[in-house]
Image (tube, grey):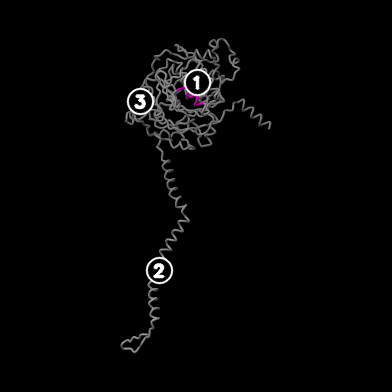
Amino acid sequence: MSSSMFYGNSISVSVSDDDSDEVDKMKVRVRRKRKKPGLRIRNSLIGWIVRKLLKWWMVLLFLPAAGLLLFEASSIGRKPALVSDSQLSKHKKPSFHLERKTNSNLNRLDPTTRVIGGVRQSCLKILPPEELQHLDIPAAEEPNNLVKKVVYISQNDLPYLEGNSTLSEQHTEPSRFNMFTGYQTLDQRGKSFEANKTALVHCGFYSENGGFKISDEDRAYMQTCKVVVSTCAFGGGDDLYQPIGMSETSLQKVCYVAFWDEITRSTQELQGNRIGENHFIGLWRIVIVRDLPFTDQRLNGKIPKMLGHRLFPQARYSIWVDSKSQFRRDPLGVLEALLWRSNSVLAISEHGARSSVYDEANAVVKKHKATPEEVEVQLMQYRQDGLPEDKRFNGKKALAEASVIVREHTPLSNLFMCLWFNEVVRFTSRDQLSFPYALWRLKVLKNINMFPVCTRKDLVNSMGHIRKAKPLITSHGALCLKKLIAGA
C-alpha cells in the first residue's frame, strides 16, 4: 500500500497495488474505445454499399445499356433529308414501316467507292450537281443498226400465225403462254431472233382480253413520260421507297411510276400509305393494275420490268428499279454516266457471284428458286440450241443481276427485251438464266454496258424483300371461292 499527501489539505488517499492495475486497464480500455466509433462508421458504410450493390447490380448494369440504346435510336432517326423537300411537300409523304435491320440503309446518299490501282474511287462517276442542273436529253437519232422497226404480234396477225386462228388449242401440255403473251411456237421463237430491218415478235399485250388492265387516266399520264423511273409490287410483297438524290431538272423531266395491284394497295393502306387524290404517294405516281395475267406474281412483275417500252410508248429512256431497293441518284445523271458517255443503249448490273448460266442454274435449284425439272427443261433446250458455257459474250460478262436496268428505247433494245420476256414466260421466272441466252442469240446487240456490282450499290439503297408476295387469285378462282363460302 502507498499513500500520498496534498499540501494545504490533510487528505490522504489510499491506493492498493490491485486498484492501480485496474486503473491502468481502464485507461487502456478508454483509449481503445475512442478509436472504435470511426472504424464502426467506416465498416457500416462499406457494408451498406456492398449490400446495395448486391441488391441492385442488375439495375446498374441495365442503365448504361439503356443509355447506349437510346443514343443509337436517336442516331438512326437522324436521316439525310430528301434532296428536294420543297417538291416533295406538294405530295403526301408515305410513312415507312421498317421491319428489317437492312432498312437502316434508307435515305443514305453517301457514295459507294472501291480501290483501283491503290486509289479509292467512286463506283459511279456521275456529274457534279452544278452540271446536273443544266443536263438535257440529247436529240433523237436514226437507229444505226440493222433493226429499224419492231412489229408486235397480236391476235389479229393471223397471216404470221400461218393462218391458224385456233393456235392455242394445239397447246395441250402445261404452258404459261396465254392471251396476254400469245402462244409462241418453237418455230416462231427461232425466227424472232433473226435480226431484220423490220422485226416481228411476240411481246405481251397479245389480246385485249389478255389482262394487265390500266385505267384510261393512268394510261394518259404514262403517254406523257419521256424519261421514266419505274418499279412494281404485286401481291403486297414490298413497301414503297421514295427516290432521293435527284436534281430540280430531273424533277421536272422524269416520271416516277409504281405499279401496284389491289393486294398491295390494301397492304400499304394498313401501314398508313394511302394514295392521294392526285394518284401520288410522294414522288411516285401509283398505277393500279387489274386482271393480272399470271398466277405467278414473279411473272406478273416481269411485265413492267421488261416491257416498259410497251407501257410507255412515248418514252425514250427508262430506269427499272426492283421494289426491294430505293433509287438514290439523279436519273438524268445516271443516263449520262451509264448510256450517253459510253454510247450504250442498255446498261445492266453484272452478277456478283457467278458468270456462267449453267452455274447459275445449279444455284437456282439449290436455293429452291425453281424446281429441278423446269430448270432442266430450260438447260436442255439451251444446250440443243448450242449455247456455249462461255462466261463472257461479246467481251461482256454473260450473267446479269438485273435488279437495275437502264436503257434507251431503240428498236433493237426493245426487241431484246421482248425476246428476254418470252424466254422467261416459256421457261422459269428466273430472268438471270434467260438473259445470257437472249444476248447470245441476238448477236447484233453489242453496245451493252455491263456495270460492276459496286455501281449498282451506288445507284440504290437495298432494303431486301420485306414480305413474301401473296399468290394471285384469278377471277375464276375468286368466283369458286365465293360459291364455296356461300355453300358453307
Q: Where 383 sits versus 132, above or below? A: above
First of labels 1, 2 by sequence position:
2
Q: To which residue does mark 3 refer?
A: 135
Which structural element holds mark 3?
Answer: loop
- Left/right placement of residue 127 relative to residue 305 reads left
Which structural element holds mark 2?
Answer: helix
Crowd around label 2: few <14 · some 14–19 · many ≥20 (10 Å): few
Q: To which residue does mark 1 refer?
A: 421
C-alpha gap between disc 1 and disc 2: 94 Å
* Quadrant of the image containing the N terminus: bottom left
Q: Position of residue 258 (x, y in %)?
A: 48, 28
Q: Amino acid at mark 3?
A: Leu
Q: Where 19 sits versus 83, above or below? A: below
Q: Which residues are magenta?
A: 356-364
Question: Of discs 1 and 2, which sits in the foreground?
Answer: 2
Say which of 371 and 486 sits in front. 371
Q: Amino acid at mark 2?
A: Lys
Q: Amino acid at mark 1?
A: Phe
In the rendered structure, does residue 360 fall within the stretch colored magenta? yes
Q: Residues at badges 3 and 1 in contact (C-beta under 8 Å)?
A: no
C-alpha gap between disc 3 and disc 2: 89 Å
Q: Which mark is residue 79?
A: none
Q: To which residue does mark 2 refer?
A: 36
Q: Position of residue 239 (x, y in %)?
A: 49, 33
